[in-house]
Every structure is written in structure tokens, then in C-alpha cells.
Image: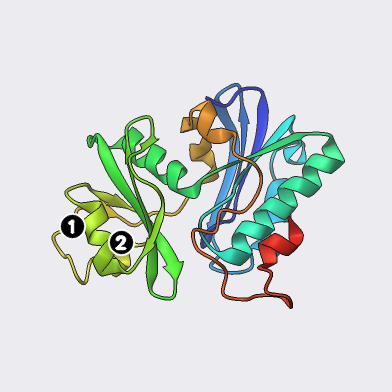
Amino acid sequence: MIASRTLVIDTATAACSVALIENGRVVAARHEVVGRGHAERLVPMIAELPDGGRAESILVDVGPGSFTGVRVGIAAARGLALGWGAAVAGYSSMALLAAAALARGEADEVTVAIEGGHGELFAQPFARGPEAIAPLASLRPEAALAVIGERPVVGSGMRWLRPIAPELAGEEALPNAADAVLLPAALAALPAKPVYGRAPDAKLPGGLLPAEASA
């Protein structure tokens, strides 16, 4: 459980989401499905929180998800942490979706599947905790079904899976910053560095990936 006052930032998917958590309780939150335009919406949403969102620590979704969205959130978290003298850490979008689904459902296991670009899905199964059962994988929808097995699915990947597996149980969902209150401490202490799930398409001169050049 997250302690003290923490600003949570989530821009890894089509949602732009922020929350202020204090001693394990959500004080205030904002959540919008923006598709694109996270950079324009994020700062105004933070400003709408009590005290302008100022907190002792900042927690940010480090992915996987949208290449641009992940970097927008991390850049904002690092910038605010520097200005406020706050600590900054990350969490996985997959773990957040799993924690929320397992907290509100009856299943003991769930597979998180979110859109990963180029017709692939990021897929990862979790048990209660949440605890990852297998490593994160980027797969075509047909291949993702083997990872899913009999588990219900949560995430934006459901819209790709329904046409090939209509009987599949699950729900479309996007990460919500307010659900970070459900994460155990170990899953809210990742480095504030992008987790892309697969290599970015673009490469800089010299063959470097954008993440390598800015690390």
C-alpha cells in the first residue's frame, strides 16, 4: 500500500489519469480518455488537484503502452520531482490493471492484454497479489490466446480478441491512476524508466534506440 502523500501519473495508454493518494486513501483524482494529447491535458489535470498536486513522492506508469504516452508521463514526473524535491518511482500498467481487476472480481487469476501497436498485444497473466505468472510478451492476438488460457481478460486488447474468441470472458479497461492505491509496495517501486514491451520502430543515427540515447 502507498503511504504518505503521493501524486500518481498515468499516461501510458489512451487515458490521461492523475490521482493524489494520502496514507493509502485517494484524496482526489482525474481520469479522461484522450487518445492523444496527453502532454496538453496532463499539467492542467494535475493543477486541478488539491495543492496543485504537490506531494512528497510521485508515482508514474512506466509502461508498457504508447511510446509517446509513456515518455510524457515520465518526463512530467521527473520534472515535478526535481522542482518539488520529491521522490519518484514507477509501476507497470499491466500490474495496475491486474490489481484493479482482481480487487473487483471473483477470479483468482487474470490476463492483462493491452494494445501494443502493429496489430500486436502486450499480454501478461497475474494471480492475486497481484503477482505475475509469466513474463510480459508482445504477441499477435491469435498467439495471445495461448497465454490467456482459461483466465478472464482485462484491458484494451479485448477489442482485438473478441472477433477471434467471442466466448472470451473479460472487459475493456484502461489504467486509472486512482487504482494505484491497490498496488503492493514492491510493485510501486520500479525505476522511473520506460518499459516499452518491444523495441521502438525508430532508430537514431548510429543504430541507437531513442530510449538508449536518453538514458
Q: Could you tell me residue 17's position as x and y percent?
A: 57, 50
Furthest residue toward front: 206
User: Which dot marks residue 177?
Assistant: none
The quadrant in which the C terminus is found is bottom right
Q: Does dot 1 land on a helix, a strand or a loop?
A: loop
Q: Could you tell me residue 113's position as x and y percent?
A: 35, 56
Res. 156 visible in picture: no
Between 94 and 201, the one nearer to me in the picture: 201
User: Which dot marks residue 158?
Assistant: 2
Q: Could you tell me which residue is drawn at 56 percent across and 53 percent down?
A: 195
The image shows residue 160, relative to residue 77, as above or below, that is below
Q: Quadrant of residue 116?
A: bottom left
User: Would residue 117 appear left or right of 43 to someone viewing this image?
Assistant: left
Res. 72 visible in picture: yes
Amino acid type at mark 2 = Met
Q: Could you tell me which residue is drawn at 68 percent across and 67 percent down?
A: 210
Between 101 and 136, the one nearer to me in the picture: 136
User: Which dot marks residue 168?
Assistant: 1
User: Would residue 27 appear left or right of 117 to someone viewing this image?
Assistant: right
Mark 2 burial class by Cα count in 10 Å: few <14, some 14-19, many 20+: many
Q: Could you tell me residue 129's position as x and y percent?
A: 37, 29
Q: Could you tell me which residue is drawn at 69 percent across and 41 percent down?
A: 49
Q: Does dot 2 land on a helix, a strand or a loop?
A: helix
Amino acid type at mark 1 = Leu
